[in-house]
Amino acid sequence: MTQFKDLDPLLHSQLRLAIISLLMGVEEAEFTYLQTQTGATAGNLSIQITKLKEAEYINVEKKFRNNYPLTLCSITPLGRQKFAEYVKALRNYLNPDQK
Amino acid sequence: MENEEKLMTGEESLKIITEMINKTKMNIRQSSFHLLFWGWLILFCSLSEYLLLKLTNYASPWYIWYLVIPGVFVSLIYGFVNGRKEHVHTYAEMVYMWTWMGFLVVAIVLMVYLNLEKRYDLIPPFILLAAGLPTFVSGFIIKFKPLIFGGASFWIFSLIAFFGGPSVAPLTVPVAMLTGYLIPGYMLKRKNGHDTV
């Protein structure tokens, strides 16, 4: 049976899970979009994005648009794989009888 | 979103995943602009050509179709400018855009082939046949039935244009614009109150 501890600790956090879930459905998203959708503060979001980036779950690209800084985030193949494993582990945890 | 380190239950995790994935559904703000723009442009060109042919002695009524060339640029620029304003690009939007870009290529190639072969009579049925696919697929992407039926109506009018003979064929394009682009376009615009068309 899957234990709670088997869930990827990097993804098993509200904000990081929300970021990864949002990035699963999009090609890329701006920092401001992630902030609006998650309702997180810029500082907190920035910290969590850095953690996901350091683990290579997401790519972060910094650009300029009309002289304003623009941060674009996208999920990496590793991020997709870890998300799929997390969902599978979560399913096993919630329904231990199902394979 | 609350403190990131708060311990979540499995149910909470599932709720966050579902909520966030639902938020990345396609933004359909741009869709009705293109449907209405092309619906009116093609309706105008096809009806003008028909009327010029019937009511005047003008030798080259098909010149009116040159309006389509600036139309392509208007559509591309509108899509590009508005695309840059979006803070996110979903996969559905990418599929939507590239389906139409694919159609643009198919339409240009078809026009070149049919003009080289001087088979002007085949332009309406072939273009309607080709236009049905992106319209039909777009309807499924944005989950909008009138557009799905609109795409299917193009295929029906393509058959009518092919088998209907020269008296019926020229009128299939303007009528198809009503069923395929304009009616779904206005319904979509009404559905999306924020549309800026």
Image: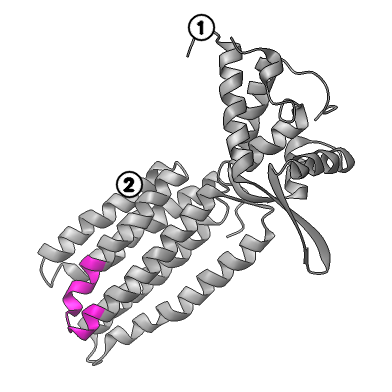
The percent position of residue A34, horizontal first and vertical second, equals 74, 43
How would you rate the neighbour count of disc 2 (Cα within 10 Å): few for under 14, some for 14-19, many for 20 or more? some
Q: Is residue B117 magenta?
A: yes
Q: Mark 1 is on which residue type?
A: Asp
Residue A58 falls in image quadrant: top right
Residue under the point 81% across and 38% down = A48
Position of B96 compared to B50: left or right? right
Q: Secondary structure at mark 2?
A: helix
- In this figure, which residue is indicated by the disc labeled 1? A97
In magenta, the rendered stretch is B113-126
| Vertical order, B1 against B108 (above or below) | above
Which residue is under mark 2? B149
Residue A37 against residue B130 in the figure, above or below: above
| Residue at 35%, 58% in the rendered image | B178
Left-right relation of B135 to B62: right
* Residue B117 visible to an observer of this rendering: yes
Chain assignment, label 2: B
Q: Residue B84's image quarter?
A: bottom right
SS under mark 1 = loop
| Residue B1, horizontal then vertical, whole percent | 80, 30
Most common secondary structure along the magenta stretch: helix
Inter-mark Cα distance, 1 to 2: 44 Å
B124, above or below A93, in the image: below
Q: Mark 2 is on which residue type? A: Phe
The residue sitting at 42% across, 58% down in the picture is B99
Residue at 23% from the left image edge and 67% from the top image edge? B126
